[in-house]
Image (cartoon, helix red, strand yellow):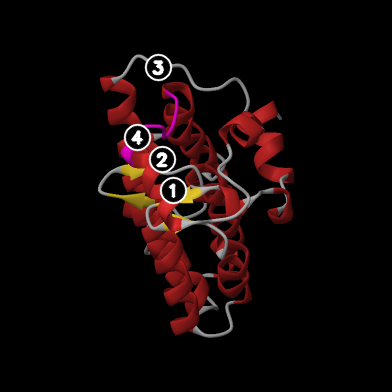
Amino acid sequence: MNQIESYIQTLKIDEVPWHRLTTAYGRASDFPKLFQQIQDMSKKSAVKSALDHVLSDIEHQGTFWHSTPFAMIFLARLFCQCVPEADDSECAALILEELLDFFNLAAELHLEDEELYDETPLPHFSDMLKEEYLWSEIYVEEEDEERYEEGEVFPDDLFYSFYYYSYQAIQYCRPALKKLEQTSFREAAEKLLELL
């Protein structure tokens, strides 16, 4: 197991300072609660609502955010967990369907980005959580907006890392994707495997 796989497999949700990571609509402060709601798989409508919230926050019009690669770790783990449960659980089947669509989009965006830009990602997944890259402890919408307006957003290597490490998180799903070959998810799974 390489260093990236180990990080993806062992990172705990409370080790991520979600309140200091950007999304398309602010900060990712509510992500732990949303992931728990998805993980519980108690009610299909609740799972769908929480999943929609997370997915719309981590990608908007082809742009990834600071929270995206970290969210992708927990989405990838969730995906792997749902593969053997899909036949018996409507919630698991819903999660697989939604994540297959999203992972295909995310993989395509990374590959497009890789062709367009000659960037190098930060050396380690965890480097994106260095203090120098994190946003303020307290979320003040006006301050975040001012930071965007002044162009003080993300250094190039950090921004490229959002795509690179999100793609690495999807790579973690390869063994699970191969198990979908004889299921109704086969077409989407094969498409994604080709992108990986």
Is residue 181 a member of the stretch shown in magenta? no
How far apart marks 1 and 4 lie (CA) works out to 10 Å
Q: Depth-wise, is mark 3 or mark 1 nearer the camera?
A: 1
- Identified at 54% across, 51% down, the residue is 71
Q: Which residue is mark 1?
A: 144
Residue 182 visible in the shown view? no
Disc on res. 150:
4
Between discs 3 and 2, the one toward the N terminus: 3
Q: Are marks 1 and 2 in contact (CB under 8 Å)?
A: yes
Q: Amino acid at mark 4?
A: Glu
> Which comes before the other along the chain, label 4 or label 3?
3
Q: Is residue 33 left or right of residue 194?
A: right
Q: Secondary structure at mark 2?
A: helix
Question: Which element is circle 3 on?
Answer: loop
The Cα atoms of the two marked residues, 3 and 1, are separated by 25 Å
Q: In the depicted view, which residue is nearer to us: 117 or 187?
A: 117
- Residue at 48% in and 39% down: 166
Q: Considering the image in quadrants, where does the C terminus appear?
A: top left
Image location of residue 141, percent across then percent down: 44, 57
Depth check: 195 or 67 in front?
67
Spatial separation of the CA atoms under disc 1 and disc 2: 5 Å
Q: Amino acid at mark 3?
A: Glu
Gap in angstroms between the C-alphas marked 2 and 4: 5 Å
Q: Position of residue 69 (x, y in %)?
A: 52, 42
